[in-house]
Amino acid sequence: MNDLSASSRITYGAVPVQPAVVRRIRGLSDKALAWLFITPTIVLLLAINIFPLVWTIYLSFTNYRANRANAPVRWLGIDWYQTILTDPDIWAAMQVTAHFVIWTVVIETVLGFGLAFLIDKKFRGHGMWTTIILLPMMLSPAVVGNFWTFLYQPQIGLFNYVVAFLTGRSASSFQMLGDVTLSPWAIVIVDAWMWTPYVMLICLAGLRSIPDYIYEAAEVDRASKWRQFWSITLPMALPFIMLAVLFRGIENFKMFDMVNLLTGGGPGSTTEVASITLKRAAFESWRTGYSSAFAIILFVTVFGLANIYVKALNRVKSR
Amino acid sequence: MSQATIAHSVVEPSPGTRRLAGSLVVLYAVITMIPLVWIVLTSFKSPDDAISYPPKVVFTPSLEGFCNLFTTRSRQTPEFIQTLGPPQGLCDEIARGRNMVVAGPSNYVPRFINSLIIAFGSTVLAVALGTLSAYGFSRFRVPLKDDLLFFILSTRMMPPIAVAIPIYLMYRTIGLSDTRLGMILLYTSVNVSLAVWLLKGFIDEIPREYEEAAMIDGYTRFQAFVKVVLPQATTGIAATAIFCLIFAWNEYAFAVLLTSGNAQTAPPFIPIIIGEGGQDWPAVAAGTTLFLVPIVVFTVLLRKHLLRGITFGAVRK
């Protein structure tokens, strides 16, 4: 039967390859075929990810500037690293990033898990509503983020109008994007709007992985719903929640597009997350060596934090 | 409908719980949809309606936003416009109402086409490379397999700006800056890591016995891969392709830093659509709407694959 289904597909599934090539590939051993299959990917990643990374590491020790490519390049050692790690502006950017990452992750996890918990009750039409809730995360953060600047307009924006309607304040009395205290929250709101569905989906996968018989056993033992939630649902969904936190944490640590379009780092530098600082240094001041060092510091930070976190995650999983 | 047929067990929520859960989710869905509905409404407003206070929900539909999106216009004196013949098409007519004439097409269509070419090109490449590598990792004993897989994944942890600095220099040296090929290669390299991980999961699930049976029947390993494994993996390949496509379609950071005129995609272009005196919001909304429509259609049509892909990818990684 197997053979039949396979041979019936020969005419449709065959890859149009030159016969000579086919003959040569057919004779290959498994080992040769394995390398033939894997090498193109590795070569592409070496060329477009690893070689540039190595180059960035080299540049971070020099005073190279991309807009003066012909100027002599001087070796600076770890000067840039010292400059960056002792620069109060960089630490301010790191604080802005931390504020953004922590608040978006907290809000998205609480809302996302809550939604997943509700959707898991399988009310009528839950499939359709899940799809609708998903829409924001499928869309371009840049294009949609750009439109949020319109919603946030103090005079004409829908967001200000709704807030004014609900609180009784004047719609033009506050500027979400122009105010020093409000603008960090403006970007948190858009990110939460966009990415809560992502956390919801991962949590939903977690909730659905809990077998029914555990709840049935709990019912037999007359455990209250409240008790079931804290002793079964939450602990068993925890690895999934932690995974969602990891992914959102990494993504938001790298966040660039939405913030660049909403505030561009402003007003002043109140929403200047690390990626915006990096972009300004690399593509506006053209301090290539300096920004390479900063890029490496950011990469090592993400990588280090993610590794520590994954260790904790594995400990939770193996419990 | 299907739920009515499921027997009520102790773990099934009560009808009251279901109704409460349903209404809360619907409330969230409605709130979350408001910005998207507003984009579509704004695209059909005239510029005056778009910036009126209080915001207008009921208005006379206008195509001015779409006209302004697709054309460039120049301001003329009423006397000069009088001397012209009858307006050429709807957009010219709207423009003349504002003392302007249509000067030519805007850059939106070329940018949109760039987006299409780059998104589809990189998706095809990433899925092709990803399928081959995933099969290799799934079926063969590759030395340092776990290290290679982790290396492939770790390339996703680089902030895009950090990658953009050396790519900018590299592309400048080898003549790939602001070319579609350069962007396709870059997006492929970003997507291929996701593709390998997703597809390895899908291929792991296909029993090895299928290929082994085919090989006993005289197929070589390569033939077995093409004729047995590939057809079985179609769902997985489709789900992976959707993910790659959505990433490449939506990408902004690389596009804004590495392209300018020739290979610029729509995401960096839409935010800089400006009219006289600031941003032309109906035109921006029209451009946004047209850009979002393909993804919304994709999401609704392919939601089952998408759901599987997202959760699957998450659990795998």
Image: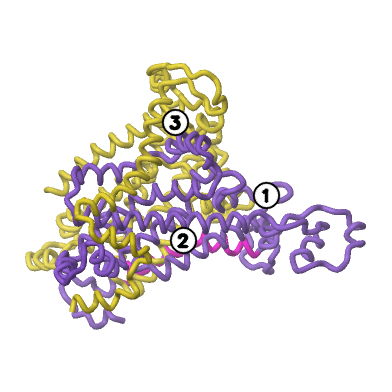
Chain colours: A yellow, B purple
| Chain containing mark 2 | B
What is the CA distance from the residue labelled 2 to the residue labelled 1?
29 Å
Q: Residue at x 44, y 21 (%)?
A: A62
Residue B35 falls within the magenta-colored stretch: yes
Which mark is nearer the camera, 3 or 2?
A: 3
Task: Tell which subunit mark 3 falls on.
Answer: A
Q: Which residue is mark 1?
A: B274
Q: In the image, which residues are magenta?
A: B18-44
Disc 2 is placed on an element classified as helix
Furthest residue in direction front, as rendered: A20
Q: Earlier in the sequence, mark 2 or mark 1?
A: 2
Q: Residue at x 44, y 49 (%)?
A: B187
Q: Secondary structure at mark 1?
A: strand
Q: Which residue is mark 2?
A: B31
Mark 3 to mark 1: distance in Å?
Answer: 30 Å
Mark 3–mark 1 CB contact (< 8 Å):
no
Q: CA distance from mark 3 to mark 2?
A: 32 Å
User: Type of residue at label 3?
Assistant: Ala
Do residues under tags 2 and 1 come within 8 Å of each other at their CB atoms? no
Q: Position of residue B59 (x, y in %)?
A: 67, 67
